[in-house]
């Protein structure tokens, strides 16, 4: 109860501080290349998302935006978003439900990416992100048809699934009561062909998938295998991030973006960090998110 009230208050304060975002120019297509952003969006994140997408689009040329309505966006939200994002197409998350995969927990988002990636380089962008300056590595990945993912620690690399699974079992030995990410990683060694697969402990909130780089079959096959190992645990919140990490790690070309140049609000270094994911545990810990967002809005207005 207390958290819910505090969260609503924090979001209200953020929206009030950043209300000038609605006076910034709309996001138009700035490239003829098939580059798109995809976001699953809820009503309470609309103002945050406008800040996220507008600061991002300032640094990365886009042709299209896909917005997945989680069911809470209302008509007023759609009108506002359409005005500011005229290149956006709207879809209902229910359109991407797959019977052979978990539902909810952002699984529909990843399955939507699996569809749209046939025609676009898709960048999954969470609404609680903020771009501060040039994203050269992202633009380089787009040009090179390389996937990317925001990482967790300095000098992080995509590694063999063998190494990851062995490390988890050795250092943690999680039971089925542990977080689904740890449980899944500990059971990678039981999967078919896992010795040829790769993995990265990244964040699904900011991930890039080159055009035609994967399809839904890969997701379904992997999901069904891991569910046989850990059962309904695979349907818990967090499994979609594991799946997203598996997908991006096994693309033909893929990198972990340099950390902490790209990082979350626990590890940001100012100056030095260009892209920040304001995850829940540190999003409103202090005024940093609000203050940085206001500063970027001033730049957009000028």
Image (tube, grey):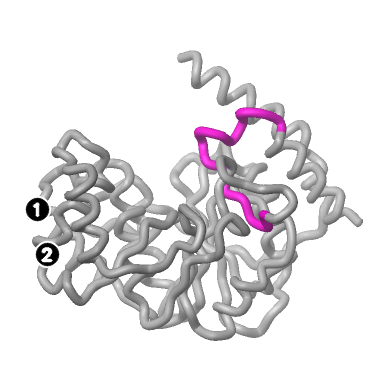
Q: Main secondary structure of the magenta part?
A: loop
Give percent across and percent down for residue 124: 50, 61
Which residue is depicted at the point 76% across and 60% down?
26
Q: Quadrant of the C terminus?
A: bottom right
Q: Is residue 278 magenta?
A: yes
- Label 2 crowd bin: few (<14), some (14–19), many (20+), radius 10 Å: some
Where disc 2 sits, the SS reads loop
Query: What range is drawn magenta here?
Result: 273-287
Which residue is depicted at the point 74% across and 44% down?
293
Which residue is depicted at the point 48% across and 79% down?
146
Q: Is residue 133 magenta?
A: no
- Label 1 crowd bin: few (<14), some (14–19), many (20+), radius 10 Å: some
Q: Is residue 111 left or right of residue 28?
A: left
Q: Is residue 148 left or right of residue 50?
A: left
Q: Which of the numbered marks, if any, corresponds to residue 191?
A: 2
Q: Are marks 2 and 1 in contact (CB under 8 Å)?
A: yes
């Amino acid at each position: 109860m207390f958290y819910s009230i505090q969260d609503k208050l924090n979001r209200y304060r953020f929206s009030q501080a950043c209300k000038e975002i609605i006076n910034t120019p709309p996001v138009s297509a700035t490239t003829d290349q098939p580059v798109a952003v995809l976001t699953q969006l809820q009503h309470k994140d609309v103002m945050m998302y406008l800040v996220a997408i507008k600061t991002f689009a300032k640094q990365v040329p886009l042709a299209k935006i896909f917005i997945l309505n989680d069911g809470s966006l209302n008509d007023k939200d759609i009108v506002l978003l359409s005005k500011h994002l005229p290149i956006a197409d709207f879809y209902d998350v229910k359109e991407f439900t797959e019977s052979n995969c978990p539902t909810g927990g952002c699984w529909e988002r990843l399955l939507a990416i699996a569809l749209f990636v046939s025609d676009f380089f898709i960048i999954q962008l969470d609404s609680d992100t903020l771009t501060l300056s040039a994203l050269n590595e992202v633009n380089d990945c787009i040009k090179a048809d390389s996937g990317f993912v925001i990482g967790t620690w300095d000098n992080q690399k995509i590694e063999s699934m063998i190494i990851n699974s062995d490390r988890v079992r050795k250092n943690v030995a999680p039971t089925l009561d542990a977080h689904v990410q740890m449980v899944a990683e500990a059971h990678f060694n039981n999967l078919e062909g896992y010795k040829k697969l790769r993995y990265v402990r990244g964040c699904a909130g900011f991930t890039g998938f080159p055009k035609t780089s994967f399809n839904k079959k890969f997701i379904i096959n992997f999901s069904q295998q891991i569910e046989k190992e850990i059962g309904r645990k695979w349907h818990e919140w967090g499994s979609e991030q594991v799946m997203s990490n598996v997908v991006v790690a096994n693309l033909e070309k893929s990198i972990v973006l340099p950390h902490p140049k790209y990082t979350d609000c626990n590890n940001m270094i100012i100056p030095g960090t260009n892209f920040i994911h304001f995850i829940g545990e540190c999003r409103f810990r202090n005024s940093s998110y609000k203050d940085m967002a206001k500063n970027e809005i001033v730049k957009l207005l000028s």
